Image (tube, rainbow, N blue to C red):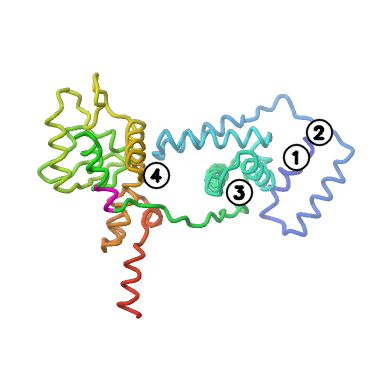
Amino acid sequence: MKNQIITEIMQAMLTVLDNRQMEQLNEVLEHTLFNYTIQKDPSMVETKEDDRLCAFIAAKRVEGCSEKSIRYYESTIQNMLKYVKKPVKHITTDDLRMYLDHYQRNSNAGKVTIDNIRRILSSFFSWLEDEDYILKSPVRRIHKIKTGKTVKETYSDEALEMMRDHCGSLRDLAMIDLLASTGIRVGELVKLDRADIDFNNRECIVFGKGDKERKVYFDARTKIHLQKYLSSREDDNPALFVSLLKPYNRLQISGVEIRMRELGRKLDIPKVHPHKFRRTLATMAIDKGMPIEQVQQLLGHQSVDTTLQYAMVNQNNVKISHRKFIG
């Protein structure tokens, strides 16, 4: 209790005293309070940590975060609070560094995961600071974790054609074409209804993260295969993609992922996943000269930086450009 009081006083004086004065204040407080026992006044009502977390989660929900993101925020912060076992006012930078180190060593987590946790904690404590629950966020001095850049694979033209030739059903063919030509997320794909498809203009409206809607476009081949698939169906389910067997329920994300993995194993194509179509489209669009802002709009990204992370420049084109402009 004594250490918590000292920490709270020190935090309150951060903006007033320099480092040398802070050290002197700490020594004075520890010396002065050494022979004293401090107890809480039972008549004082203290806000519970759960209340602050609930308020933060409510704020994120109001901002438009998806339920999936909100659950990730909540579980990440709860895990930290269970480990640190301190009120948020008394959590220090060292506490959080110890927690991140503990989590990394015990869960064998990668640097990307640890940096994601750091970002969530930074968001939480920055909000506490803005709401005047704390004076200064303890995450400020924990810098972004260097994760390095990994080259993520895209589908080759040959791999895409092989998948089209061997997918085994009109539904899967239409699904592959729609993913490949629009670059939509798998979560957006399974939410589509038949009525959402505008065949005349070869476009449709999808609802992305935070229920933000945007228009995406598909090519003539996708149009033909979608029409063939819909014409072959005998059910009245409004969903664009449904299961192959009765009762023809709306296809779920897991169902799409399973079909893609099975197809990849069958054709010996590594890492076949719905999201890889999205990365392939972004890479191809940028590689062919599409302005990055238009690719950003097509993919539904808030930041251009996110779009650039999805796209890789074709190394062959770098070689051709080098010979053209330099060599």
Mark 1 vs mark 4, CA separation in Å: 54 Å
Residue 37 percent across, percent down from the top left = 85, 33
Mark 4 vs mark 3, CA separation in Å: 36 Å
Residue 272 percent across, percent down from the top left = 36, 43
Residue positioned most to the top: 247
Q: Foreground: 259 or 238?
A: 259
Q: Label 4, on which residue?
A: 271
Q: Residue at x 55, y 34 (%)?
A: 53
- The nearer-to-camera label among 1 and 3 is 3
Q: How many marks?
A: 4
- Secondary element under disc 4, as helix, strand or loop, is loop
Q: Give the quadrant of the C terminus.
A: bottom left
- Secondary element under disc 1, as helix, strand or loop, is helix
- Hey, what amino acid is under mark 1? Ile
Q: Label 1, on which residue?
A: 5
Labelled pair 2, 1 in contact (Cβ < 8 Å): yes
- In the image, taking residue 219 as reference, residue 82 lies left or right, namely right
Is tag 2's residue or tag 1's residue first in the polypeptide sequence?
Answer: 1
Q: Residue at x 77, y 57 (%)?
A: 21
Mark 3 vs mark 2, CA separation in Å: 28 Å
Is tag 3's residue or tag 2's residue first in the polypeptide sequence?
Answer: 2
Is tag 1's residue or tag 4's residue first in the polypeptide sequence?
Answer: 1
Q: Label 2, on which residue?
A: 38
- Hey, what amino acid is under mark 4? Lys
- Mark number, residue 139: 3
- In the image, taking residue 209 as reference, residue 54 lies left or right, namely right
- Hey, what amino acid is under mark 3? Val
Is 136 above or below relative to 20?
above
